[in-house]
Image (tube, rainbow, N blue to C red):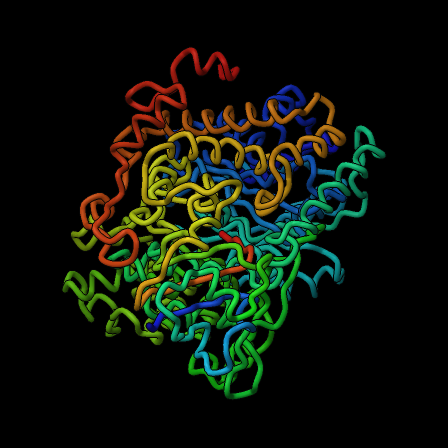
Amino acid sequence: MKITLKLFATLGVYLPTHATGNVVELDVPEGTTPDEVIDRLDVPGDLVHLVLLNGVYLDKNQRSSRVLKPGDAVAIWPPVAGG
Amino acid sequence: MAWAKKILRVNLSEGSVKSEPLNMEWAQQYLGQRGLASKYLVEEIDPKCDPLGPDNKLIFTTGPLTGTMASTGGRYSVVTKGPLTGAIACSNSGGYLGAELKMAGWDMIIFEGRSPEPVYLYISNDKAELMSADGIWGKSVWAADKIIRAKHQDPQIRIACVGRSAEAGCFYSAIINDLHRAAGRSGVGTVMASKNVKAVVCRGTQGVGNIKDPMAFMKATEEGKKVLRENAVTGAGLPQFGTQVLMNVINETGALPTRNMQEVQFKGASKISGEAMHEPRKSDGKPNLTTNAACFGCTIACGRISTIDKTHFSVENKPQYWGNSGGLEYEAAWALGAATGVDDLDALTYANFVCNEDGLDPITFGATVGAAMELYEKGAITKQDTGGIKFKFGKAEVLTKAVELVAAGEGFGKDLGLGSKRLCEKYGHPELSMSVKGQEFPAYDPRGIQGMGLAYATSNRGACHLRGYTVASEVLGIPEKTDPLVTEGKAGLVKAFQDATAAFDSAGICLFTSFAWSLDDVAPQIDAACEGGWSTEKLLELGERVWNMEKEFNLEAGFTKADDNLPPRLISEAAGSGPAEGKVNELDKMLPEYYAARGWDEQGVPTADTRQRLGLS
């Protein structure tokens, strides 16, 4: 199934080379969790701070337990803030 | 004591300057900067006075940590009654002016009256004098800065200045110091120009003394710096991507106000984001972002220094804009971009440069252009009103022309200089102004971040993100994550952020330290610098006292519960996409809880018990 992965700020370097901007479409097996997507791209766990699934925050437990659906968008940031 | 213990009182009507002692009894209750200057203001002016009349006062104020070795200890604020809102105004700026003023030996400057002729104030340590503004009145901030430097022949003077927009009466003119740092909001620059004051020019060589316990202060400030250094946000995230990293965060969250808050997500967000500022451009291979930058004493360095593509239409044949200057921060990028539907990064950077060059608040400016675009698309204003400009959403050329017109106070720029509230009232659609108490919203849609709706509605200076930044908790998880789509617990959250923020703002340090510091980190630094036993509890009480004092000023100025509200769009038109799709802001649920948490009655008036508890007389 296809999902969209967005890696922002300093995490952009972990995107595959064919990514456009900070976004890439990935083909993942049924049953994949956000943590498995993060592992697949070798994003260091300590840099994974803010994870949104279709814009909704996932806490650490949800990242390993939530099963992704076709068309889902996972967006990830290192620790950031502003204002 | 890190206070200089001296105030410079400038009577513009008489043309006199005099030194007077700082009220140290008040300093124990209000600390400094926002708190202490607001105390002076409420004691000295009639809350009902005309903000642009001689009876209003304008206070430049430092905090006890300004100019010290505390990290980010370079802040100053300008406190006055704001012309955009009619409410108490306090605009905070970084750069180097605040520290210079302190090192010249002054805690505050109080301007009163109105000068018969344009003047500027020149301070060299203990010496202060009013000088003629001949030759700089009528000039932009950047032009005046050059002339003043050439005149005084001192490369180390620091200058805060107003631009042509303030002289023309734009209601949201800023005071710009160090060319691109701003006391930005509520029209504090407009007040300065109304008093015929063009600039404050300062040179201070005395350092900051009076530290209560220097050894303890060195230890406490170093411990504070270690916390900032080791925190992933203040140690790495902010210096690398600045506040602009939020553009994609807030857009993904579904809370990026777009096209005058008609939508909550902007397709062009990625093109104007912090990430986009790092992308090399085609013409010269260089990115928009040249480097990051720090204000005085800051160990975070979130500032953005940018260049515009020389081939971009906005700067063709304008070499004066080809160099580096202050780049886009998140709020400015949002207002100039998403609020207007413009996704041209260089056009936004140009508009930001001009806001700095002529002293405009880019938040209110961008939001007002967004409101004008909606008025135009609804047919409420026409090309006859705009001088032939088609004010359509998404047009970069409209944005760049609009900023030039407001900067110069010409043509339709005079209407845009009214701010969105007066503009929308003038053209028969007051409901299209996305503002509270006359001040425009910043970059967070309260339908997608419920707590921010309450923070905006109750902010004492009108809609503002810097009075209670619950985004930190609701979106970023600092200090702990709360759900942005629910109202439960938000009354207490907003109050806690508001009170703590008032304490940070009274100390002389930057609010951005609060991404890593709690008041537990701040208290030891203040306590080592200042006499009075400054604990976390005392700082929290101080924050609550300041908040209530500001509120009472606004009540006396004529504001009521009806002003603690949001525009109808945000409480009746549901978000159309993202996680908040179908939601409005539920202010009606939060506001009564908030009043109760504050110890206010049902009309939002502090009760006698609350006033007594906080020592407000």
Report the side of B49 relative to B425 (left or right): right
The front one of B109 and B307 is B307
Can I make out residue B169 in this image?
Answer: no
Residue plotted at (60% across, 57% down): A46
Residue B172, image x, y percentages:
41, 51
Report the side of B237 relative to A3 (left or right): right
Please identify the quarter of the rendering in which residue B290 is found: bottom right
Please identify the quarter of the rendering in which residue B571 is found: top left
The front one of A58 and A69 is A69
Instruction: Work out whether B562 lies above or below B301.
Output: above
Residue plotted at (37% across, 60% down): B251
The front one of B592 and B552 is B592
Residue B164, image x, y percentages:
47, 60
Residue B85, image x, y percentages:
36, 41
Please identify the quarter of the rendering in which residue B215 is found: top right
Residue B608, image x, y percentages:
41, 11
Residue plotted at (56% across, 87% down): B284
Report the side of B1 relative to B496 (left or right): right
